Every structure is written in C-alpha cells, then in structure tokens.
Amino acid sequence: MDVSEEYDMMEDLEDIKESISTQDLPSAIHTINKYLKKQDLVELNIGVTGESGSGKSTFVNAFRGLGDDEEGSAKTGPVETTMEPQDYSHPKYKNVKVWDLPGIGTPNFKADEYLDLVEFERYDFFIIIASDRFRECHTQLAKEIMRMGKNFYFVRSKIDTTIDAEKRKKNFDQEKTLDIIREDCENGLKKIGIEDPVVFLIANFELGKYDLNLLQERMEKELPQHKRRALLLALPNITLEINEKKKKALEANIGKVALQSALVATVPLPGLSYAVDLVLVKKEIEMYYNTFGLDDPSLQKLCDKSGKTIEEMKSRMKSPLRFGINKASILSLLGAASVFVAENAVEYVASLIPLLGTVVAGGMSYMTVSRMLKRALNDIAEDARDVLIASVGTDV
Ligand SMILES: Nc1nc2c(ncn2[C@@H]2O[C@H](COP(=O)(O)OP(=O)(O)O)[C@@H](O)[C@H]2O)c(=O)[nH]1
Ligand SMILES: [Mg+2]
C-alpha cells in the first residue's frame, strides 16, 4: 500500500473523528449509524416541465434508466397524458423522484398559477424542455421559477431528429450543427428576456450522447452539498464521466463503513485475526453493483437493448466478485487486502479513534476493510466502464 493511500484512509475519518473520540462505544456506533442513515434519507425532487409533446415523460423515464414500456415508466406518446404532477421514484433510490408535470403553453397559461398548481416548493430544481424553439411561455415560466428562488435548466430535446434532418445537407459537421442549435436556442431566450441562458441538447433515446455530461455537471455544482450524492448515485451509468463521479461519491463513504464494521463486529473471523461485520460489507458491495447497473436485472436489460448476452458481458468483467458476492468471496478479498496493511498505519488509526483499541484488533480491521472496499469499488467501476463501452461502442 503506498503512502498516499494510507493517508487517504486516515483522511476518510477526519470529519467524524472529533465526535467519535469523545464517546463510548455504543454512542459512537449510534453516531456513525445515524450519519450513514441520514445520507440515505436525503430527498431529491426534480420537476420536469415543458409543452405537451416536448418529451417530458420520455425524459422522466430515460433519466431513471427506464424504457417507455417498462413497468413503472411514465406514459409517453402523441397525446398529452399528464394533467397533474405525477411523481416517479428512481427504481433503486426511492428518495430521488422525477416529477412529470402538466404541459405549459396552453392559451391561458400563467406561470404563477402553474407553479402554484404544481406546488413549486417541493422541487429542488426544474428542467424546462422544448423540442423546438423556446417560446414566451418558457421564459415566463423560467422567470417565475427564479422569482420563487428556485433553479431551472433549459433542455432542447429531440436532437436526434434535428441531426438526422441536417445530415442530408452537404458539408454536414455534427459539432458545428450542435453549436448552431445551441446558439439559436440561447439567442431566442435572450431575445425574450433571459440574460445569460444556457441550453442543454438532449436526445431522450440516446441520453448519454449529447449534453448530458454538461447538464449533470451544472446540476451537481448548483445543488447543496448534502444533495449531490443522491443525484450522482441516481444518474444512469451511461457516460464515462458519470461512471467516474459515481465512483467518487461511493468512495467518500468507505471510511465510515469500515469504521462502522470495526466498531460493531467483535468476534474475529476464521482465517483472520480481527473482526469484520460481513453483512455490512456485503451490503455495501451489493450497493456498488446496483449503482453501476451491474446487478443481474440491470445487466439483463442492457443486454436486451444492445443484443449482447449476459455471458458476453460477464466475460468482459474482471472483478473477483462478479460471479457472486458471498461470505467466501468477501473473506478471500479481505485476506488479500490485509497483507498490505502496514503496522504503523494501524497504530496511527488506533490513535485517531481510541475506541478502536477496545474492540478486537480494531485498527487492523478498519484498515483492511477500507483497503478491500476501495479495491472492490475500483474493480467494479472499471467493469462498469468496460460494459458501458461494450454496449454502446466507443462513443461515450
Ligand atoms: N426522436 C425523438 N423523439 C422523442 C424524444 N423525446 C420524446 N420523443 C417522442 O415525442 C413524443 C412525445 O413525447 P412525450 O415524452 O410523451 O412528451 P410529453 O407530452 O412532453 O410528455 C413521443 O412519441 C416520444 O417518443 C427525443 O429526444 N427524440
Ligand atoms: Mg407526458
């Protein structure tokens, strides 16, 4: 284990060591459980609005990684079906809700009444979708949203159709075409009164392809710190950038999970000289697979879409856990990770968290689990990357 890695593992505890070092064992366990639980309870509500037919419901599905015919997906099609706000929970992170809002731009449309109707306070931000030009109703709504102290993002949908039409022209250049559309939308918005507009180009059926990364970056940057994790975990794993962000978001918890395991477990495991909470570690690793969409149901769905077989996909994966996350496979990884743990690092961790000295070989347990989870996460993120590249070609 190199020095910077050891240093990271100690850093992982910085924000929690103060509160824990003054407590007895039961209170420390309680504090750390509470910290982790609170994180899982953070809600994120995204309001998706725009004119009828602009692709709101399709976006709501795509954002949650669902096709339009799947169980739990929003109805889409040529006829507006949404008369009142309808919430759609993320299939894996129930506290992340994407709301399919009623269409705007009807003859008597009034932004303030509309926002009352949809109970605007509820949303962390809005996405305003237009499938063609932005019109007065879009800016009216944007201004009212701003006035209410909320955030919004302009999305121009159906870029695939526009690109297809432009492709017929001689000298077609995709990047240039995209720039022109973006600029045209932004100029349109300026003319009707938005000062410094940014428009994100999206194709709902190929969500990872155009401006999703830009949109995702903006959302993340502008969300309050404590909500970012929820967004990053819920995003579909469809670009390399999102893949990397997810990994970072998951990594940020490893210190706490390793500490929780070391504090809770008391009986040394067979073959190891220290105690580890295997149930906890297993749950965390399963969560990694889920978040990256490498759990069996998600993988199956991806195969259905890309015409590949599960065997083909699994043959690209390298994580030792891909054939099953169980006691034996976890124990073997823990054994391998413990070899690299240096004695002085263990002593240092035990001095940071004196309570660890009261549990069986606590420092060793913390360092090993932390090391093992980091390696597992790296492997799984890399597998997810390879699977992503295999399923869409290199164009991610
Ligand atoms: N080509 C293309 N079609 C889209 C896109 N988004 C939505 N659609 C289609 O546009 C129609 C209206 O979409 P829908 O999501 O129901 O619009 P809503 O009324 O705003 O909810 C449906 O037939 C969708 O399949 C897109 O990005 N590209
Ligand atoms: Mg709809």
Image (cartoon, helix red, strand yellow):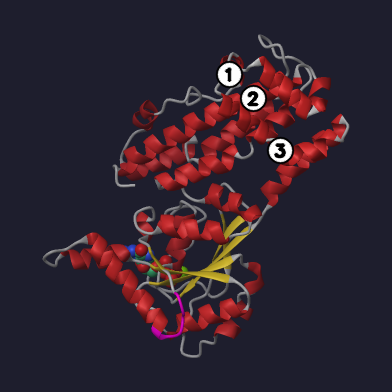
- For the magenta stretch, what is the residue range? 191-196
**Residue at mark 2: C-beta within 8 A of ligand 1:** no
Numbered disc in front, either 3 or 1:
3
Spatial separation of the CA atoms under disc 3 and disc 2 = 17 Å
Residue in front for this viewpoint, 125 or 114 = 125
Placement of 336 over or under 162, stated as above or below:
above
Residue in front for this viewpoint, 148 or 52 = 148
Magenta region, main secondary structure = loop
- Image x and y of residue 190, in percent: 41, 81
- The reply to whether the magenta stretch includes residue 64 is no
Q: What residue is rendered at 68% in x and 10% in y?
A: 270
- Image x and y of residue 383, in percent: 43, 32
Question: Label 1 amino acid?
Answer: Ala
Question: Label 2 amino acid?
Answer: Val
Spatial separation of the CA atoms under disc 2 and disc 1 = 8 Å
Question: Label 3 amino acid?
Answer: Glu
Q: Answer with left or right where residue 171 lies relative to residue 41.
A: left
Placement of 101 over or under 256, stated as above or below:
below
Q: Are marks 3 and 1 in contact (CB under 8 Å)?
A: no
Q: Are marks 2 and 1 in contact (CB under 8 Å)?
A: yes
Q: Secondary structure at mark 1?
A: helix
Total marks placed: 3
Q: What residue is rendered at 30% in x and 40% in y?
A: 307
For label 1, the residue is 337
Which numbered disc covers residue 14?
3
Placement of 17 over or under 359, stated as above or below:
below
- Image x and y of residue 77, in percent: 39, 67
For label 2, the residue is 369
